[in-house]
Amino acid sequence: MRVPTITASARPSPRQDLPSTAHKINLQDLELFHVYSTTTYATLSLSTTLRNFWRIAVLGLALNNEYLLDLLLLPTLRYRSIANKWSATLTTLKRCSFGDVPVKEGSFEDWIFLIQGTRQLRDTLGWDASESSLAPLFKFGAERWDLQCPSTSAGVYGSDTVCEIQDRINAQVEDLESIYIYTETINSLRSAVYYSVGLEGTDVFVWLHRCIDGFLPLLERSTQKAQAILEHFCVMVKKAETQWWLQGWANRIMSEVYGRMDEEHRAWICRPAEEIGWVAPSG
């Protein structure tokens, strides 16, 4: 029997910033579309502004772009999968772990690739994107960027985990340019974690975006100091894991990076590992 279809291009849509592509939505896609527009969108951010952005602006664009629509339905599939696991656990009264990130979902290197891709988007649209459908996202990102600005909280801390790694880097790194990059990265991380009471998943990517020009190139070269700083970044990720789509990533990143570190620098990450409850593999 032929499955009924609905042509998305026949529907009225808001202003578009992506090329229109006529396509058809089958019943399974329509079901996922309904789940997204009624439930999933509200789990993607703690901000009302961003929730409305995902519910209205992004949906309007997705209805006219097949590739974007497919991407939009992916988190709904993942969300339903996790929700079903929780339901089964509550029903059977068994304890189950939902914190493991499947290998097929990629690695942290995928995050870096996507973040670097935003450079082209930023250069194309410029910082003034008020006329774009992405305006709410840019505005929210700018607000969180300002919140993470080191000048707003520099010097607030006494003794903390990131102060320890800063002292170690100062004692071992002689190149002034590298010291400057490491210091700026650590200060921005300290500021971001300081505001952890209101931390949400978007803040994780805002912090990574701050590091595009200096820190990420060092990270791509796999310098041991950069790897150690990234392990401290896992503390920030862990604090943002109140949102389902980030759950498990702190431990996943910690494990991936730990495998690339030498014995000396592995000793640098004991405190962040303890803070997120991660245990190094034996042997």
Image (cartoon, rainbow, N blue to C red):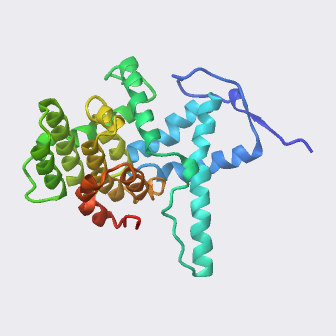
Q: Position of 5 compared to 168: left or right?
A: right
Q: Quadrant of residue 205?
A: top left
The single residue placed furthest to the bottom in the displayed view is 93
Position in image of residue 241 (x %, y %)? 39, 58
Q: Residue at x 57, y 61 (%)?
A: 82
Residue 56 seen in the figure: yes
Q: Position of 166 compared to 70: left or right?
A: left
Residue 37 seen in the figure: no
Q: Residue at x 40, y 60 (%)?
A: 242
Position in image of residue 110 (x %, y %)? 47, 39
Position in image of residue 157 (x %, y %)? 10, 55
The N terminus appears in which quarter of the rendering? top right
The C terminus appears in which quarter of the rendering? bottom left
Position in image of residue 209 (x %, y %)? 32, 35
Q: Residue at x 26, y 62 (%)?
A: 270
Question: 143 or 94: nearer the eye?
Answer: 94
Above-or-below relation of 232 to 95: above
Q: Position of 215 compared to 183: left or right?
A: right
Question: 203 or 282: nearer the eye?
Answer: 282
Question: 12 or 257: nearer the eye?
Answer: 257
Above-or-below relation of 7 to 170: above
The single residue placed furthest to the top in the displayed view is 124
